[in-house]
Amino acid sequence: LANAVTLGDLAGYLGGELIGDPQRRVSRVAPLESAGDGDLSFVAGRRYRALARTSAATALLVSAADRGIADTARIVVDDPYAQYARAVALLYPEPAPAPGVAASAHVDPKARVAASASIGPHCHVGVGASIGERVRLVAAVRVLEQVSIGEDSILFPGVTVYPGCRIGRRARLHAGAVIGADGFGYAPYRGAWIRIPQIGAVLIGDDVEIGANTTVDRGALADTVIEDGVKLDNQIQVGHNVRIGAHTAIAGCVGIAGSARIGRRCRIGGAAGILGHIEIADDVEISPYTLVTRSVRVPGKYTGYVPFDGHRDWLANAAHWRQLSRQAERIEQLEAIVEQLRKGGP
Amino acid sequence: LANAVTLGDLAGYLGGELIGDPQRRVSRVAPLESAGDGDLSFVAGRRYRALARTSAATALLVSAADRGIADTARIVVDDPYAQYARAVALLYPEPAPAPGVAASAHVDPKARVAASASIGPHCHVGVGASIGERVRLVAAVRVLEQVSIGEDSILFPGVTVYPGCRIGRRARLHAGAVIGADGFGYAPYRGAWIRIPQIGAVLIGDDVEIGANTTVDRGALADTVIEDGVKLDNQIQVGHNVRIGAHTAIAGCVGIAGSARIGRRCRIGGAAGILGHIEIADDVEISPYTLVTRSVRVPGKYTGYVPFDGHRDWLANAAHWRQLSRQAERIEQLEAIVEQLRKGGP
Amino acid sequence: LANAVTLGDLAGYLGGELIGDPQRRVSRVAPLESAGDGDLSFVAGRRYRALARTSAATALLVSAADRGIADTARIVVDDPYAQYARAVALLYPEPAPAPGVAASAHVDPKARVAASASIGPHCHVGVGASIGERVRLVAAVRVLEQVSIGEDSILFPGVTVYPGCRIGRRARLHAGAVIGADGFGYAPYRGAWIRIPQIGAVLIGDDVEIGANTTVDRGALADTVIEDGVKLDNQIQVGHNVRIGAHTAIAGCVGIAGSARIGRRCRIGGAAGILGHIEIADDVEISPYTLVTRSVRVPGKYTGYVPFDGHRDWLANAAHWRQLSRQAERIEQLEAIVEQLRKGGP
């Protein structure tokens, strides 16, 4: 249920310059091609410009370079896409439920819950846990003993935070995320496995977002650490004692094995994998489906997957994958013989 | 707890021709080799025929081609395997709990729940949600604001459906499935990420089944769409604004990035990946572990993974993967030199 | 909250020989380099020895070979790493909540719950379920009809066990694990899919640990079986009718398709895949990201993934992957021509 806002107010909120009637209002966002009366749209990059000229949007967010792009009302901003994100948040505010604890929730008497927090139905807040100001536990969130949740965080249904873990401010944890389950640590002993109790915790900084059904294991001895501003997509697995540097973004289905250290501002593509004890420098990009098997010291983009093909073609080529070593030998032999032939040899 | 049914009734239910005593009863299904008195089995394909001749099953489902295969009572049907599936459903009906709302459930006064629906313990039905006739929310299901669930659907424990999503009729959503969490959308801004509020929803057609811990993200602006009859296995990740065509079946652990469009009747193997904004035609088959990096316009089967091998052999060959470009040059040089030699050159 | 224990008691508990003052106490564990007063550490392997000599730990667990390694108090044990695991469990006992059923839990009158079991908030125990002695259902655990949970097991928040499944003793099931959801079984029929009801169950042996958000599907007709001592990490998918042999350990994000049979004492790396109906012998090791496409009869290590590389180098080499078959032909032609040239031919 969108809000309406005047262009004057919007320009003020976004810190931009309005070219147009400050009293007009927008109440929705829409793509340039389908936008109509009351819609806000944005122009970011060359391919948007043609669409901008014919768009029926009420107002556009544009960069300084595009200030003259159309007669439509425009708000000139530093970064139209980022300011669009802010505008959407303004126009489509998330519902803010009344503070308080639902009747069906279970909050331990020894937990501290800020008066402005909202604890939804069937939530569970354990002994010694601390829930900050304006935190929202939507429903059926399990916050176990001694956990702390920083102010303005939202935890969606079915999130579990194990004992002793700490979540920073403005966190956004989606449904089914599990923070602080045991790391996978066993000692082999007489043909079986002895579990190594995992006594570290998980420390999560501010402004971290964690996707649905993503799991972050607690540390074995020291803590697993996720720094400020990290964004994790759905169904990511983060092993024990991993450290993820600030503002790194990781796409869905990635697996990160124990004790890996990932730098700041990295971008990791979907279903990539990072082996244990690997170090990845700041500003590294990993392609989807790429398994990182050794440390990466130099910023840049790294890749390793098989280009797909029609099945028969793949089959014909794949048969040779297992012959590459032998093939290399044959090429060397050919080179030696040809070299001899050139010299007039037999 | 199986039902018993006479062969006459069973043949009528399956639309088949009975050869045998209509008063005999079957109460279970079993494989040909272990079936005994009271068991129904089926014959589908050549390798089943020898087993069929010696099976102690009480009755067999057979195709017209196999009508004379044994003296056992037979029901001749159009498709023995499909009719077997229907027979199992008849013999092993799922328990139908009494309609009503469990005492520990939380149903918002502004939600509509059909009188024939069953809302189990610790379920949560939010403001404005609509639960259709004969829907079953088994336990601890979270149906948030303005969600609608079509008639005869079943949602298993721990399913979360985010606000505004719509689920069709006869859906089957397994435990831990998350429908409508935020898509992974951020704008880079001054060294950090600004979240782009995801204001689309998820629309799911009729007869869709979704596996345990599978996640389907809500759309950024438009909706994520799953058409009728789609079958998703466990632990699949479906990004925002994806569209999956009718009757497509996707195996476990597949990841589908944002805005991919998958055709109808496709089959996608386990742990395959589809990059964002890709289009896949109808009737395409993708092999397991294959990453689809560009659109596929032609029906057929597509593959891309490394054939596995003993570790030492793999290691020997893999070393050459990173030399393929150089190796190709060497072959070209050899060809040039050999051509010269053939012409009597130096 | 760690316990303190005297070295005399600890040596007795671990079955080791104490060299040092039996009255001294340790209350924590720590790595050799950061250990201090009151800390226990361990020496396992060559690279630990130098650290051991300078460690400020109060006591060390050492092997017989290292009994003279330092002046620090030592406990000589058969396997320092395994005994370290036992010592951690002694020093950091998991909280044992009081037996009983939380007020917000729902236990069906026809379920049996041992008097020593602890059923936490918002748990659900269905008709005919059986909960053994000292079992702990932490919170919001869903144990459906006719399930049995063996003694001393712990199920963390959000675990779902579907009807009829059996869990052995001393199980440890982490948050969001789903045991017994439907296997992915459909019969194609007239352009759509008919679901094959999955009437087998899941049988889990003793001492099995299952990670967060891991899913184990119920059998189609027979049962899915996980033998004693198996360790499954997070986000693993186990298909219907799979059998996993005793003491096999599987890392995160692995997918195992239906009816695969995995031997005993296997180790399977992260995000590996096992296709359906494959058999893997005992004592097989599968590398991460490796897809096993045929049965493995011989113990040993198996691998199949693409070595990653800088993106440009990968791109240059990957272009040739789809030319390998053609390239092999060119090498054969070269060999034939060169052979002719050697013989003095044209």
Image: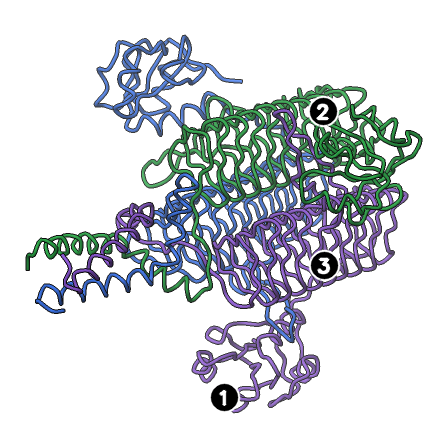
Chain colours: A purple, B blue, C green
Say if C221 sits above or below A45 in the image: above
Question: Which picture quadrant has residue A251?
Answer: bottom right
Say if C204 sits above or below B167 in the image: above
Mark 1 is on which residue type? Answer: Ala
Out of A29 and A266, give the one closest to the viewer: A266
Q: Secondary structure at mark 2?
A: loop
Give the chain letter at badge 3: A
Image x and y of residue A67, in percent = 55, 89
Structural crowding at the residue carrying mark 2, measured as other residues with C-alpha within 10 Å and reported as few (<14), some (14–19) or many (≥20) = some
Q: Secondary structure at mark 3?
A: loop
Query: Do the residues marked 1 and 2 share a common chain?
Result: no
Image x and y of residue A232, in percent = 62, 57
Give the chain letter at badge 1: A
Mark 2 is on which residue type? Answer: Asp
User: Which label sits on residue A171?
Assistant: 3
Q: Which quarter of the rendering shows the C terminus of chain C?
A: bottom left
Circles 3 and 2: CB distance less than 8 Å? no
Image x and y of residue B39, in percent = 41, 13
Q: CA distance from mark 1 to mark 2?
A: 67 Å
User: Which label sits on residue C108?
Assistant: 2
Query: What residue is shown with label 1?
Result: A70
